[in-house]
Image: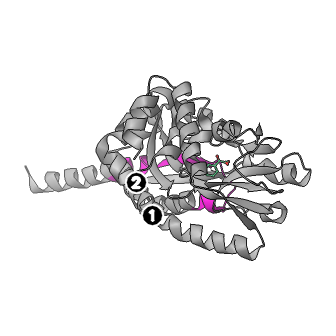
Amino acid sequence: MHGRVGLALAVLLCMVAAGAARAQEVTLKAITSFAEKTFYSRGFERFIDKVNADGKGQVQINYIGGPKAMPPFEVGNALKGGVVDLANVTGAFYTNVMPEADAWKLAEKPMAELRQNGGYAYMGNLYEQKMNAILLARHIDNNPFHLYLTKPIAGPDLSGLKLRITPVYRDFFQALGATVVQTAPGEVYTALERGVVDGYGWPITGIFDLGWHEKTKYRVDPGFYSAEVSILINKNAWAKLNEQQKRVINDAAAWIEAQAADVVKENEADIAKQKAAGIEVIKLSDEFRSKAYEAGWAGVMRQSPEHGPRLKALFAK
Ligand code: 173
């Protein structure tokens, strides 16, 4: 090729490529089902910051916010329908779309192992089919749930108590005789204040975020299950990304999922904080915990006779 023509062509190609790259910057819309800047949103917010730093000119995340923008129990449907592209949410909040998602709480193996043993892949199929989504990262794990109370109990008998729940605790608390009422986290404080409930289920961390410690007198030990909060992406939004953009997202996802191991430090910090706040511990036997798993798996089997047994084989110890 003639030198000058070749150069002109090269310059032209560069301009076209640069224009294409600019045109390719994609903005994804993101929502969290927990209040902004509180414990269960913070991992997601770090993920967003990393994507926005690493993805300049390629992919950016527009963080819409939390429950003020969308009720937590509607996040699953919004993600499925593409109203949002990314969501920070726990399985219990979208059992209406995918009942099996609540089974993450029963996993007794770390995500690294579930990604190896087929557990993640099995759930991945259900996410595709039922949620039109991909689970990118589970950033909360190693984080037991507890029962918190405003009045004491003498043993594992919850009859006569009205407790705030989500699907996480329903089968277990009901098996022990409790009356249950489901609320979003944003309604727990008022329910306690008005005496509508005698207690609530929640993980070991985060009760200070929304001021519940003011109304909480007792924590029941042992804890049970392992709280799951994950980052999901709509499948169509994912399919539209190029390889570079996917790499930015995948790298940030792997980075934040690896941090789920650090949650144990947060657990210890909140246990100390609860003690300092005067919250008394009611210590029950380990049977309390094994009953939780029994009731939890029975619930999964009932909700999903097809997938429950397979999930138990992959998730349980
Ligand atoms: O209690 C809840 O709202 C709930 O189900 C949950 C799940 C994971 C993390 C925090 C709360």
Residue 42 horizontal/vertical position (percent): 59, 62
| Residue 124 in sight in this render | no
Residue 290 horizontal/vertical position (percent): 54, 47
User: Where is residue 157, by image quadrant?
Assistant: top right
Q: Which residue is outermost to the bottom?
A: 276
Give the residue number, with chain letter if any, for mark 1: 261
Taking depth in this image into account, of 123 and 106 the one nearest to the observer is 106
Q: Is residue 88 shown above or below 123?
A: below
At mark 2, the secondary structure is: loop
Give the residue number, with chain letter if any, for mark 2: 110
Rounded to the nearest whole Å, what is the CA distance between mark 1 and mark 2? 9 Å
- The residue that appears at 64% across and 36% down in the rendered structure is 171
The answer to which of marks 1 and 2 sits earlier in the sequence is 2
Q: Which residue is outermost to the top?
A: 306
Labels 1 and 2 touching (C-beta < 8 A): yes
Bounds of the magenta segment: 18-42
On residue 202, which mark appears? none
Taking depth in this image into account, of 124 and 284 the one nearest to the observer is 284
- The residue that appears at 84% across and 47% down in the rendered structure is 197
User: Where is residue 274, by image quadrant?
Assistant: bottom right
Q: Amino acid at mark 1?
A: Ala
- The residue that appears at 52% across and 36% down in the rendered structure is 297
